[in-house]
Each structure stands twice: as structure tokens, then as C-alpha cells.
Image (cartoon, rainbow, N blue to C red):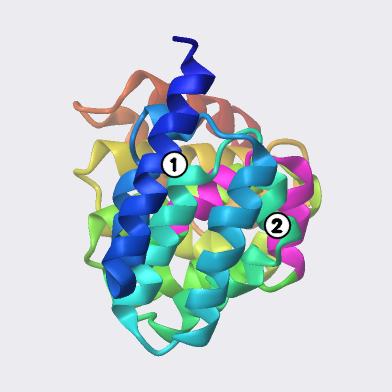
Amino acid sequence: MPRKVVSRVCWQQCMRTCQKLGSRRLAALATMTGHDDCNVMYTKVMLIDVIIPVLAAMTAHMGQVSVQKLGLKVLGNVANVDTKTAIASARGIPVMLTAMTAHIGHAEVQLQGYGVLKRLACNHNNQIAITSVGGIAVVLAAMIAHTGHADVQLQGCGVLTSLTCNADNQTAIAAARGISVVLAVMKWHMRITDVQEQDCGALGNIGWSDTTLQKRIKDKGGVVVVQAAVAASGATAQCREHGQKLLGKLT
């Protein structure tokens, strides 16, 4: 049986299960949409049957942490090449950012939110949309709120790396003190190689071609921090590659 047919059968079975579960529908959707076969859906079906209802539930129950975590998890599960624009067109980005702001003290909400934002930010239009509704400030605020949480820092920097593929976002992140935050993260988690790699990637994008931004990274002590990351015994190949390219521009 073709994969798309299997997916539709799986989808229909899962939807019937969700309807029986009533108040547990979001939790069931989180499980369902994480299923490999159910990840191949037509955008229209996903928009009507999943994305819009989930965003409505999140909006109606913004004060409930569990609803926000599960809602973000569902959106992260369905955020693929076909649905990235559908989530944005359904005003999903402002809802997600509101949830992250409302529950900034909950690391799991931030992690789930970062996961969706990182997927959405692979799309150029979404990179602009996220920034236009204050996404950079939300991402940085969560990183500052969870300085000791390595996973939050890793995922947050992952979002920044995706956003900095856009030149205007590079400037916006620098203006929001993002360079200082990223360098602080590298100092907080010097031994976490994945964090160092992501941060070198983000800084490398920010300082890719704008000499003003390069100078700002240098003035914030970026050369010493990046040199330490590159020289670390456990540094990944990508960390060294990104770091050395950046150092070549700064020194």
C-alpha cells in the first residue's frame, strides 16, 4: 500500500481515538503527530484538522502550562516543508511566542517553543515573520531566564542560527544585545560541545559580512571566547570550522 494511503488510514484511526479521549485530545495528538506514517499529510488536512484547532486550544487556555507544552509539541511534530507556511498563515507564530512569554519560567515550554521556531525559521518568509512580532526578544529572554539549562541554551542558539540566515535579522539580534547573550552562553557552558557549535554558527552568521557587526563581536570579547571554543579538546569539526571562519574576519 502506498505510503500516503497508509498515512491517511493511520490519520483517520488516530482522529477517532482522539475524539473518544475528549479532554486528552491534545496529548493524543502529540503522540499521533509524532508517528512516522502520520507525518506525511496534505497541508490542507493538517491546517483544518490539527493546526487551527491546536492554536485555538492554546489561545483559549494560555494560562495552562500543560496545554501550551502539548500544543507546541503537536506544532513541532507537524512543522515540515509543507506546513511551515500554513502554521504561519494561521497566526501560529504570535500564539507560540505568547505561550513562551506567559510561561517563561518553564523550561519545557521554552524547549518545545524553540523546536517549532527552529523548524519554521528554515523558511525565509518565516524568518521575517518571527522577527516582526518580537520573536528575537522572546528567544533571548528565555535564554537569559534559564542560564543553567544547557538544552534551553542549545535550542535557543539553534533558533538564532536559523534566524541569522537573514541579513536584517543579524542586525536585529545584535541590536537586542544578542551578541552579548550568545557570548555569555558560551562562557556558561564551555564544556558542552553542541552549545559551542551552535553559538559559533550563530556568531558566524551575525558577523558574516557586516564589518560593524564584526567589530561589535570583537568589542564584546568575542575573539577570546571563540578561540577557547575552537581550541577545546572536544570541539566538533563544525565548531572549529565556524569558529575559524569567524576568527578570520575578526583578527
- Dot 2 alpha-carbon crowd within 10 angstroms: few under 14, some 14 to 19, many 20 or more: some
Q: In the visual, does 238 lie left or right of 212?
A: left
Q: Using the image, tell me which numbered label, if any, was put on residue 91.
A: none
Residue 125 magenta-highlighted: yes
**How far from the left and from the top, in percent, is residue 172?**
72, 63
**How far from the left and from the top, in percent, is residue 29?**
37, 54
Tell me where the magenta segment starts and ends, as one range: 114-132
Mark with earlier residue (1, 2): 1
> In which image quadrant can residue 235 be found?
top left
> In which image quadrant can residue 48 be found?
bottom right
SS at mark 1 in the image: helix
Q: Residue at x 27, y 53 (%)?
A: 151
> In which image quadrant can residue 236 be found?
top left
Task: Tell me the mark number nearer the camera, choosing from 1 and 2.
Answer: 1
Q: Using the image, tell me which numbered label, if any, was put on residue 12.
A: 1
Q: Is residue 162 above or below residue 8?
A: below
Nearest the eye: 153 or 112: 112
SS at mark 2 in the image: helix
